[in-house]
Image (tube, helix red, strand yellow):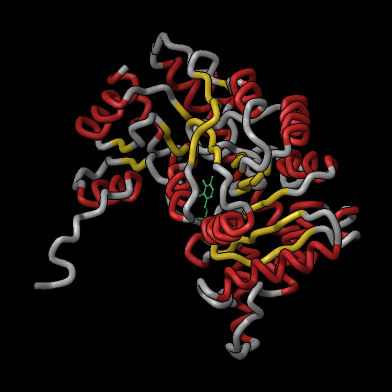
Amino acid sequence: ASIFSAVEMAPRDPILGLNEAFAADDRTNKVNLGVGVYFDESGKIPLLGAVKQAEKARVESLPTRGYQPIDGNPAYNRAVQHLLFGEDSPLLAAGRVITAQGLGGTGALKVGADYLRRLLPSSKVYISDPSWENHRALFEAAGFSVETYPYYDAKTRGVNFDGMKACLNALPANSIIILHACCHNPTGADLMQSQWREIIEVMRARGLVPFLDMAYQGFADGIAEDALALNLFAASGMQFFVSSSFSKSFSLYGERVGALSVVTASKDESARVLSQIKRVIRTNYSNPPTHGGSVVAAVLSTPELRAQWESELTGMRDRIRVMRHSLVEKLKAKGVAQDFSFIVQQRGMFSYTGLSADQVARLQKEFGVYAVSSGRICIAALNTRNIDYVVDAVAAVL
Ligand code: PLP
């Protein structure tokens, strides 16, 4: 008998399954709001001008294809640290931050999870309720037991801050807490500065281990502004983990460009921690690919390209904002009684619309408008040509 004869079919990834159903739908007016990707006004994934130029220069220089160091491209890792913590960060000057290039934000989370499992084998991991689906799966796959802390409050469409704080305040020391640094996926609800300060104080007092996931830097208020939580943690004196990604901010999804950074207590600790993280990487994929990291490093360290990237990122952020306002206004103009003004408050690429699973199913079946069953839609998949159709469809299922 085949060794595979008893293998069961794994459940389909809910979002990738949605994409397959969308691809198979032959309606010409169909709209996919289920994705986690930024599309431009023409409905395409942009290739940023700054990226195009850096890629052209790189290809023309005909670089050889030797192995990278286990922890990746040093120029890239330095650029990541500057973007996350600021060039003048005292933590960087003190050698308290180590960074390893990762395979996107997901790869960075995975390396961080595997390392934490070795460091703190009896800790539990806590993710927000709800969170990005892959957080649970990824930390469970690393061997952790994963639980949730209260986060979203459907009544206020904001954060259940008291619930979150009370939960964290009751956890044992060394519990690992996954936090969305900005642009919470899926809800779009972020903590305010004063709330971050309170959460940091609770985590510091209880000895919890923060792991900040930063997949959307620059998609809410700006590059430096969106690093607020990170910098508050940096100022707290705590040790913490950061996974970051250029999938969205550089539109480099398939190149898998991300990083794992760890803030330690001293330069000496940094050296030891990095040596252990390199061990995790070495036994996973040995070392990361060259292209994406070198393109990002070139853009970030070349003043003209950097300025161009910042302006292109601002363009993406502004277009999302325009689509949020437009969606709210058009629903109102359509005579929809329910107040959707919360959509303009939500941050990042997504909106948690409050549409029920039944309403989402009707959108798909009757209109070819695809959304996640939780009611999450990708605002960056809207454009001036499809928004009226989406508004009509939403109004019809309410
Ligand atoms: N973390 C969150 C919260 C995300 O939403 C995503 C992407 O959707 C990621 C991490 C992973 O990003 P990447 O595509 O770089 O692996």
- Kindly identify the residue that appears in the image at 39 percent across and 16 percent down: 334
Q: Quadrant of residue 344?
A: top right
- Kindly identify the residue that appears in the image at 59 percent across and 42 percent down: 178
| Along the line of sight, the residue nearer the viewer: 34 or 179 | 179
State the residue lying farthest toward the front: 122
| Along the line of sight, the residue nearer the viewer: 9 or 114 | 114
| Along the line of sight, the residue nearer the viewer: 239 or 104 | 239
Please provide percent x and percent y for residue 385.
Answer: 40, 39
Above or below, comparing residue 112 to residue 358 in the picture: below
- Kindly identify the residue that appears in the image at 19 percent across and 47 percent down: 26
- For the image shown, how many numbered marks are present on the structure? 0
Please provide percent x and percent y for residue 276.
Answer: 66, 68
Kindly tell me whether residue 29 is visible in this rendering. Answer: yes
In the rendered image, the quadrant that contains the C terminus is top left
Residue 71 left/right relative to 343: right
Q: Quadrant of residue 222?
A: top right
Q: Quadrant of residue 166?
A: top right
- Kindly identify the residue that appears in the image at 55 percent across and 42 percent down: 124
